[in-house]
Amino acid sequence: MDDRFERLGLTRRLLKGLVTDPVSNYLPAEWLKGLLRYGKSEMAAANWADPGGWRSMVISYEGNPAQIADKILVHGGTLSMALRNRLRLASRLLTGLINTAEPPVHVLCLGAGPGSIILRAMAAADVPCEATMVDLNGDAFEYGRDLARRYNLSDRVRYIQGDVRDVGKMLDSPPSLVKMIGICEYLQDEQIVEIAVRLAEAMPPGAPIVMNNITLRHGSDRFCRRVLGLHMRHRSVEQLTALAGMAGFGRFSVHDEPLGVYSVIVGHRLEA
Ligand SMILES: C[S@@+](CC[C@H](N)C(=O)[O-])C[C@H]1O[C@@H](n2cnc3c(N)ncnc32)[C@H](O)[C@@H]1O
């Protein structure tokens, strides 16, 4: 995947607003599910098996699905385009943070899936760095280890199968940097605050945390909920930074991807 952001031109925006969003959001869900089943959509099957899981994310990242139904979802769907933009934006920001962190650099990645974002960031960084990936779903790790091998980073990563809500038990060494990309939209407010409190207890003052919000600008929330079974919590930047702020993080900078669906937010552990 190259480094350029994906955008929607005027014609595609019109088509989306007048045709694809109304059709996908308002046709009966059973018709749409039937069409996706008939079209052997791997993206839909991955979401039905594990809503919001790593596999459907990787199908969007790889961007070359075999089935026509998936080609439409991956290249025509704003959410898929925005996901690739978020990958580009977050990995670029993480590379900068790794380069400026105090060595030795250790990144803790919560809800990491296979670690696609951090591995891309580590490969582009000028300084060595280690990463710990935590995910509920251990079947992401085989794909992740293979990806790490391709980046020549196998000896710098470890994978832990676990629930991010138990992060307190995973902080054996203070992380220089914490990445929470693609996870807050699956957590309740109280869970985000509780996790951030545990992190703030372990992180040195000034250490960065990287997170993202998601807005309704993708235009397909009804489709995601009714057809894919994907229930995401949409929050404004202000709502998400307020939650992290309650736990002792501040000095936030906000970085928007061009489709307006995701912002990547960098905060810092404040002095106690
Ligand atoms: C949408 S994927 C994002 C993967 C990766 N962070 C990325 O952005 O490419 C969400 C991941 O969070 C994981 N996840 C969801 N809830 C979790 C929890 N409570 N503890 C650990 N992992 C969780 C899922 O298994 C999945 O791999």
Image: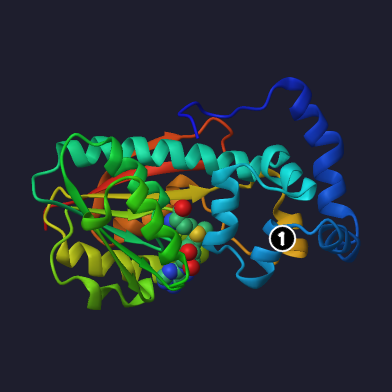
In the rendered image of this protein, does residue 44 appear above or below residue 177?
A: below
Q: Is residue 206 left or right of residue 219?
A: left
- Name which residue lies at 54% across and 52% down: 58
Residue closest to the eye, 45 or 167: 45
Residue closest to the eye, 259 or 61: 61
Q: Is residue 48 left or right of residue 110?
A: right
Q: Is residue 244 left or right of residue 26?
A: left
- Name which residue lies at 39% across and 47% down: 117
Tag 1: amino acid: Ala
Q: Residues within 10 Å of mark 1 (few under 14, many from 20)?
A: many
Q: Residue furthest top?
A: 10
For label 1, the residue is: 44
- Name which residue lies at 57% across and 40% down: 82
Q: Where does residue 258 sit, x and y in percent of width and height?
A: 54, 30
In the rendered image of this protein, does residue 66 appear above or below residue 228?
A: above
From where the camera sits, is residue 252 visible? no
Q: Where does residue 169 sit, x and y in percent of width and height?
A: 23, 78
Residue closest to the eye, 160 or 250: 160
- Name which residue lies at 26% across and 50% down: 153
From where the camera sits, is residue 200 visible? yes
Q: Where does residue 256 sit, x and y in percent of width and height?
A: 47, 34
Q: Where does residue 244 sit, x and y in percent of width and height?
A: 33, 57
Assign a secondary structure to mark 1.
Answer: helix
